[in-house]
Amino acid sequence: MWTDNDTSVDFVNFAGVADTVAEVIVRAGGQPVSIGVSGAWGVGKSSMINLIRRSLEHREDGEQFLFVEFNAWLYQGFDDVRASLLEIIAGALKAEAERQETGVDKAVELLKRVDWFRAIRLSAGTLSSLSIGTVALDASCGMVR
């Protein structure tokens, strides 16, 4: 049996087709576009997808695309392959959002999660001690505040 290894090296002169497909994707401008890659086993479908990905990544505007890999063969026999596909897409989108999150975004998210009333209550004793110049002893753990 022949091995079926996909590649991103253009052994079969698919680069022209891959570049054309990449251009169709870019010109879609975020609008839905469907592109089918079909063929018999071993003719280079996965390699074509890799070449399209490489073509998009080498463009100036290639950063705007998120590639999600899904191998439907791994889900043969599952009742709902679509649910598996959606789960993989959601996971990739979440990971990309976390990757793009800046320090400011993380700080804002942290500030949203803080229970401000509890924080004020916990710090009130320390603040009052500092304001009158005394040191308060925390009875729960014997620590000086």
Image (spheres, helix red, strand yellow):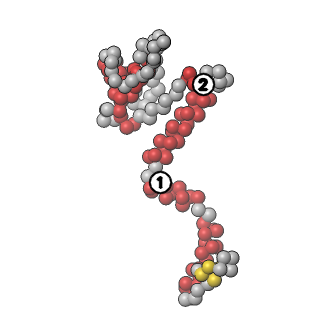
- Residue farthest toward the front in the current orientation of the protein: 1
Q: Report x, y in % for residue 49.
A: 42, 23
Up the image or down, 128 lies above or below 53; here it is: below
Q: Report x, y in % for residue 7.
A: 39, 24
Horizontal side of 26 relative to 99 (left or right) equals left
- Residue lying at 52% horizontally and 28% vertically, measured from the top left: 70
Instruction: Give, as a three-letter code, the residue at label 2.
Output: Tyr
The quarter of the picture where residue 33 lies is top left
Instruction: Please rate how many residues cluster around mark 2, counting C-alpha atoms within 10 Å: few if below 14, some from 14 to 19, many from 20.
Output: some
Identify which residue, 15 or 120, lies in the foreground: 15
The reply to whether residue 61 is in sight is yes
Q: Which mark is residue 62?
A: none
- Residue lying at 48% horizontally and 44% vertically, measured from the top left: 97
Secondary element at image label 1: helix
- Residue lying at 31% horizontally and 32% vertically, measured from the top left: 59
Instruction: Give, as a three-letter code, the residue at label 1.
Output: Asp
Secondary element at image label 2: helix
**Residue under numbered circle 2:** 75
Give the mark, 1 or 2, whose residue is nearer the N terminus.
2
Up the image or down, 92 lies above or below 139; here it is: above
Q: Report x, y in % for residue 54.
A: 35, 29
- Residue farthest toward the top in the current orientation of the protein: 40
Instruction: Please rate how many residues cluster around mark 1, counting C-alpha atoms within 10 Å: few if below 14, some from 14 to 19, many from 20.
Output: few
**Residue under numbered circle 1:** 105
The reply to whether residue 27 is in sight is no
In which quadrant of the rendered image does the C terminus lie? bottom right
The quarter of the picture where residue 65 lies is top left
- Residue farthest toward the bottom in the current orientation of the protein: 133
Identify which residue, 32 or 17, lies in the foreground: 17
Up the image or down, 21 lies above or below 96; here it is: above
State the CA–CA distance, disc 1 to disc 2.
Answer: 36 Å
Q: Report x, y in % for residue 131.
A: 55, 85
